[in-house]
Amino acid sequence: MNLSIQAAGVAAWPASDAGASLAQAANAAAQADPSSAAHAASPLIVSAVDPNDHSRLDRYLSALGAPLKMGGDAEQMAEALVPAMQSLLQQRPDLGNAHFDFALSRGSLVVKSDTLDDADRAWLQDFLNGNKELLQAAQAFHDDAVAGYANWAEADGKPLSAAQLDAVSQQADGLVSFMDLFKKLGRQAHATLLAQVSYMQPDGSRLDLSRDPGSANGFLAFMQGAHTMRDGTATYAGPAGQTVYGGLRGDIFSMIGTAIPQFLPPSASRSVGLKETA
């Protein structure tokens, strides 16, 4: 039996499950986004792996599972930001609609904004860096990205030197800015909703996962929608006009699709081939 596990699109299973079956791996591969540029850009080259070489196989599987772990890290960041943005609105209501984004740089959060002046941007940057849970989750996102890269390189027989690992760490800092990542995750999830249906939240407002989370007020509204979808508390009118309760449930941070970047080293292969013999 020949089995190809694709890295492109990375609809992955949890990397922590070292006992994940080959059937699970194949299923995860089958759900990868076929529109991904990495999927279609070049002819398929497969790395042949002995199924009995568990160390090498586990490294490939861990690398392929990194985006799912990063999605979990992004969720932890978002949850840490909810009370932070509520506190910001109490302390600085004048910044409630100010647009900003932030990224990780060598262990610290860096705020960027086209609307904030230098003093307000510096204040917001210090405010975010004072949030221990947010900083830890951002660092975990970074570390899981680096680990995926390093595991693939190791499995390819090209382990990273200390200098190379430091360079990869710097690249991982620039992978995403987090408010933009939340926006992509939300819009990706929103695209799965039925266009002709109005989903309503418990407070009577319309569920809209495509809204821009790039301000304190926008982010809190965005997370209200994410929580509504996660908890299955939205309602909508069915085809006969009846109200449907609990018909929509999902975690936008697990629907990673192409929102979470695939971060792997340059390699001739983006697939793992397993040959099973009797």
Image (spheres, rainbow, N blue to C red):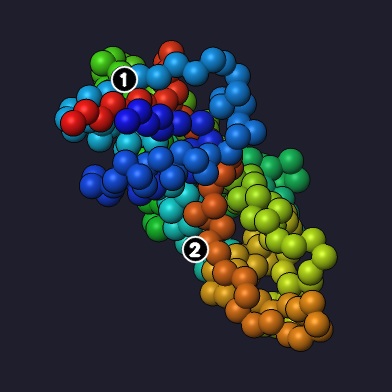
Q: Is residue 233 visible to the viewer in this orientation of the structure?
A: no
Image quadrant in which the C terminus is located: top left
Which residue position holds label 2?
79
Which of the pair 61/170 is nearer the observer?
61
Horizontally, is 185 left or right of 241 in the view?
left
* Labelled disc at residue 48: 1
Q: Nearer the viewer, mark 1 or mark 2?
A: 1
* Labelled disc at residue 166: none
Name the amino acid type tagged 2.
Glu
Q: Tags 1 and 2 in contact by the CB under 8 Å rule? A: no
Which of the pair 247/189 is nearer the observer?
247
Horizontally, is 20 left or right of 174 in the view?
left
From the top left corner, tell me how far across and down residue 275 is, in percent: 28, 26
Secondary structure beneath disc 2?
Answer: helix
Kindly identify the residue that appears in the image at 40 percent across and 40 percent down. 26
Image quadrant in which the N terminus is located: top left
From the top left corner, tell me how far across and down residue 227 is, in percent: 57, 70
Q: Dot 2, how many residues are within 10 Å of its Cα: few (below 14), some (14-19), or many (20+)?
A: some
Kindly identify the residue that appears in the image at 25 percent across and 35 percent down. 58
